Amino acid sequence: MTNLINIPILTRKVKNNLPKFIKTGLAVVATLLLTAIITDKVTNGALNQALAGQSIFSSSSSLLMEKQLPIYCVKTDKKQIALTFDGAWGNEDTATLLEILERQNVTATFFFTGGWISSFPEDVKTILAKGHEVGNHSENHKQMSTLSKEQCKEEIQIVHDKVRELTGLEMTVFRPPFGDYDDTVIQAANELGYHVIQWDVDSLDWKDYGVDSIIHTVTEHKHLGNGSIILMHNGAKYTKDALEEMIIRLKEQGYEFVTVSELIYPENYKMDHEGRQYVDGLTCPPQAEATPAPSGTLREY
């Protein structure tokens, strides 16, 4: 006799065991994810690097989703660092900062908004004439991760055109306001020929903690090392008073100051999971890990 399937009984069995099936499935998924994370940590991001591949503008990926990272720092065997200033609001201290940089024979990179450039065009020319670099900081200092790709491009392109018309310079480095970015921001900048630049050493000058705080924060920063990018501001309250002593102490540690464009690799590079730019085959001293900020995190004024 042919055995007939008892549909009601089968349905009841499946229903009764459904929680067990779901629990088992979730356990399998969790195990796979944990294994992937441990593998990536043990191999120091090799899995991410393998997924990202190699290109002029390369990015770090994960198993769950691809996340593009800006350049936080650079892996280099040279004891070089880049000093950067963001400018969006005032201009009272810029001349003093330039005098200190000239006295210490140090070059730096200044990231300016379109509004700042329109207000102080002669200062932009002076900065370039003194051998410093000028970078793009967007037109209106908006939170870029809230914008569409076309809006991001407009924010960047307007400033680019202003500086090109004013000085003939074709800028290639861009720092998003507040250090805020997402994949769209990075893609928009890359498509316009820009490298997106963050930092791994924040002076915290924008918090107005005082001169000694700025000097100590930078010169004893746990991330400070070959290829570090230091964040400062041309309009913060104590920056001009802390700058020279900070530079002197960094020089005593053996560091050479270069512009961002001199520090980074312009092409054929890779990015690791922490936003450190590198090229294959380069042996360097150990460097403290930089921690990329999650998308939408505001890290400066």
Image (tube, helix red, strand yellow):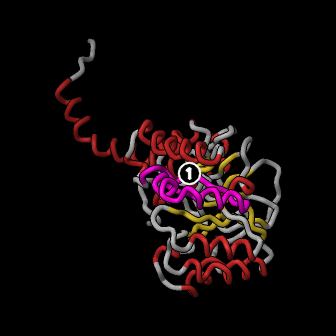
Q: Is residue 284 visible?
A: yes
Q: Position of residue 175 (x, y in %)?
A: 55, 54
Q: Number of numbered discs present?
A: 1
Q: Residue placed farthest to the bottom in the image?
A: 212
Q: Residue placed farthest to the left in the image?
A: 8
Quarter placement of the C terminus: bottom left
Q: Which amino acid, mark 1?
A: Asn
Q: SS at mark 1? A: strand
Residue at point 81%, 63% (across, down) = 78
Residue at point 46%, 40% (across, down) = 154
The answer to whether 99 appears left or right of 206 in the picture is right
Which residue is nearer to you in this view: 88 or 71? 88
Q: Position of residue 252 (x, y in %)?
A: 78, 81
Give the labeled residue for mark 1: 136
Q: Position of residue 223 (x, y in %)?
A: 64, 70
Q: Position of residue 102 (x, y in %)?
A: 73, 72
Question: Is residue 75 depicted above or below 144 in this figure?
Answer: below
Quarter placement of the N terminus: top left
Which residue is nearer to you in this view: 102 or 258? 102
Q: Is residue 126 magenta?
A: yes
Q: Is residue 67 visible?
A: no
Which residue is nearer to you in this view: 161 or 28? 161
Q: Is residue 95 magenta?
A: no
Residue at point 62%, 64% (across, down) = 84
Callout 1 crowding tier (Cα within 10 Å): few <14, some 14–19, many ≥20: many
Q: Residue placed farthest to the front in the image?
A: 122
Question: Is residue 219 depicted above or below 65 in this figure?
Answer: below
Snapshot quadrant of residue 86: bottom right
Residue at point 46%, 45% (across, down) = 155
Residue range in magenta is: 111-140
